């Protein structure tokens, strides 16, 4: 299937909102405009074969070559003004390169006589374009010993290439704006959802809230494991494609189902929030997919441009074009970052509250002067061993710790959000202390001696 058809079909079939479809890359229009560009070039004797031949000419100043700049000097930053500039080796006013077709020679001859006043020299092009007077040394031989030869710089006036790149740039800008809008909307939804889940699962609200908090914790743990849109693993680091994201999402949902997590949600609010969470992810997949196919359309039309004109723009355009979103492909990363700060963090994960020494919940929490937090047990043991330095940052703070370093706010938070883990840790601390007092055979099973 031809790309134009394929593109149209996926725009129709993927269920994108009409507003998106309307601002998709106008591939057909660009193709028509490209035809005008090729016609225009052909009329000047600059068909793709001629241009491609000229493009491969080694950079020997005594032969004809050209530059095609996409970012021609322009005062209006919104508009592209590409410039096709020729460097022509003239002898007695005639272009001497043997590779040129008669039409091209004719054209160049005509244009030389017309543009003598605006042309500069090759040296001028290689140096600073602006610093040399426009009528610089047309008479003086520059690079050849032959008396009447000189290199002349000639700008070829084209119209339709400017039109082509304007259409493309305008569309990329529109798509950028659309993307920003969608990203904003989704971002706000993420914040709202985070707030709702936070409100619903406040442990102080009762048993159901506490049960749901545990369930959400498990759901988000799975979600993080799925790395739906962005992988932080070394093996496949980076943003995922939409089809990879779909696969990861499917894995996540299967896990949630098989653990009956949605069924365990006690509150209506929680169940609704889960549905919202899923549709948010689905929308993000759509955004990604839309970005992908438009990106592909831009790549394809630029390749076509190069194929038809030999002007080699497909590498230059993405650099020159001003696109913060579409071509940058940052949407997945941005939104994922937002999800983890605004949404997933409202359900505290145990991993973030572990003591870095014993890997149990850091209870009682002691915050050292360096701000690192350890459980009181581990600190007592360290100071008994005479260790002075924080194991994380090597600051000389352990011996300076006192009762003041107990973090009572953190302790209350841990009791509220991780009651099971805190109880377990208290028991473990007691067991350990008793073993220290009564010896290694101590067991905390009920005493059987009456
Ligand atoms: Zn510890
Ligand atoms: Zn430290």
Image (spheres, grey):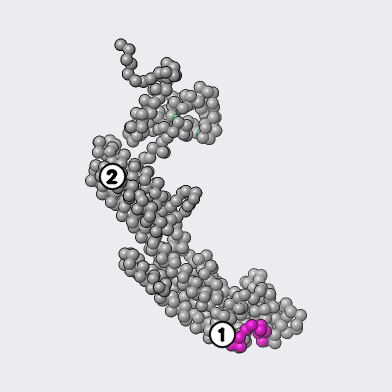
Identify the mark nearer the N-term, 2 or 1.
1
Residue at image coords 58%, 77%: 52
Q: Label 2 crowding class (10 Å Cα cut-off): few <14, some 14-19, many 20+?
A: few
Residue at image coords 33%, 32%: 420
Q: Where is residue 404 in the image (x, y as percent from the top left)?
A: 44, 26
Q: Residue placed farthest to the left in the image?
A: 268
Left or right? Give the position of 96 relative to 347. Answer: right
Left or right? Give the position of 238 relative to 91. Answer: left
Magenta stretch: give its range.
94-103
Q: Quadrant of residue 208?
A: top left
Q: Where is residue 376 in the image (x, y as percent from the top left)?
A: 44, 27
Query: Is residue 348 in sight in this rendering?
Result: yes
Q: In which quarter of the image is the C terminus?
A: top left
Name the secondary structure under disc 2: loop
Name the secondary structure under disc 1: loop
- Residue 198 magenta-highlighted: no
- The label on residue 325 is none
Q: Where is residue 327 in the image (x, y as percent from the top left)?
A: 46, 63
Residue highlighted by disc 2: 260
- Residue 101 magenta-highlighted: yes
Q: In which quarter of the image is residue 288?
A: bottom left
Residue highlighted by disc 1: 45
- Magenta span: predominant SS is loop
Is residue 291 or residue 133 the one in the foreground? Answer: 291
The vertical placement of 84 against 196, above or below, is below
The vertical placement of 333 against 357, above or below, is below
Q: How far apart are marks 2 and 1 (CA)?
A: 71 Å
Ligand 1 falls in which quarter? Answer: top left
Q: In which quarter of the image is residue 113?
A: bottom right
Q: Position of residue 136 (x, y in %)?
A: 67, 78
Q: Quadrant of the N terminus?
A: bottom left
């Amino acid at each position: 299937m031809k790309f134009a058809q394929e593109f149209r079909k996926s725009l129709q079939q993927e269920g994108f909102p009409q507003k998106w479809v309307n601002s998709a890359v106008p591939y057909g229009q660009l193709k028509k405009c490209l035809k005008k560009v090729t016609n225009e070039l052909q009329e000047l004797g600059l068909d793709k074969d001629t241009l491609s031949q000229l493009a491969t000419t080694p950079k020997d100043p005594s032969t004809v070559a050209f530059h095609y700049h996409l970012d021609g000097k322009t005062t209006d930053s919104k508009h592209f003004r590409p410039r096709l500039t020729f460097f022509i080796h003239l002898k007695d006013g005639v272009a001497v390169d043997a590779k040129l077709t008669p039409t091209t020679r004719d054209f160049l001859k005509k244009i030389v006589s017309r543009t003598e006043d605006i042309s500069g020299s090759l040296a001028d092009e290689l140096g600073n374009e602006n610093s040399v007077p426009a009528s610089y040394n047309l008479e003086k031989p520059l690079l050849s010993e032959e008396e009447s030869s000189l290199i002349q710089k000639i700008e070829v006036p084209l119209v339709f290439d400017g039109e082509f790149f304007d259409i493309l740039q305008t569309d990329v800008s529109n798509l950028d704006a659309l993307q920003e809008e969608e990203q904003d909307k989704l971002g706000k939804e993420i914040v709202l959802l985070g707030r709702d889940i936070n409100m619903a699962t406040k442990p102080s609200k009762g048993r159901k809230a506490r049960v749901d908090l545990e369930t959400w914790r498990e759901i988000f743990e799975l979600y993080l494991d799925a790395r739906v849109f962005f992988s932080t693993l070394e093996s496949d680091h980076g943003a995922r494609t939409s089809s990879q994201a779909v696969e990861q999402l499917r894995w996540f949902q299967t896990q949630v189902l098989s653990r009956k997590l949605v069924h365990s949600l006690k509150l209506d609010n929680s169940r609704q929030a889960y549905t919202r969470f899923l549709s948010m992810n689905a929308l993000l997949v759509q955004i990604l997919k839309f970005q992908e196919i438009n990106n592909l359309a831009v790549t394809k039309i630029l390749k076509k441009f190069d194929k038809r004109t030999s002007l080699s723009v497909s590498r230059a355009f993405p650099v020159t074009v001003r696109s913060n979103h579409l071509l940058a492909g940052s949407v997945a990363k941005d939104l994922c970052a937002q999800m983890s700060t605004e949404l997933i963090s409202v359900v505290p994960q145990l991993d973030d509250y572990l003591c870095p020494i014993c890997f149990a919940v850091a209870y009682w929490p002691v915050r050292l002067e360096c701000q690192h937090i350890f459980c009181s047990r581990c600190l007592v043991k360290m100071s008994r061993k005479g260790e002075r330095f924080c194991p994380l940052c090597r600051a000389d703070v352990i011996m300076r710790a006192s009762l003041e370093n107990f973090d009572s706010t953190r302790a209350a938070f841990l009791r509220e959000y991780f009651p099971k883990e805190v109880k377990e840790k208290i028991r473990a601390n007691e067991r350990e202390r008793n073993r220290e007092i009564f010896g290694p055979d101590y067991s905390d099973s009920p005493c059987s001696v009456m």
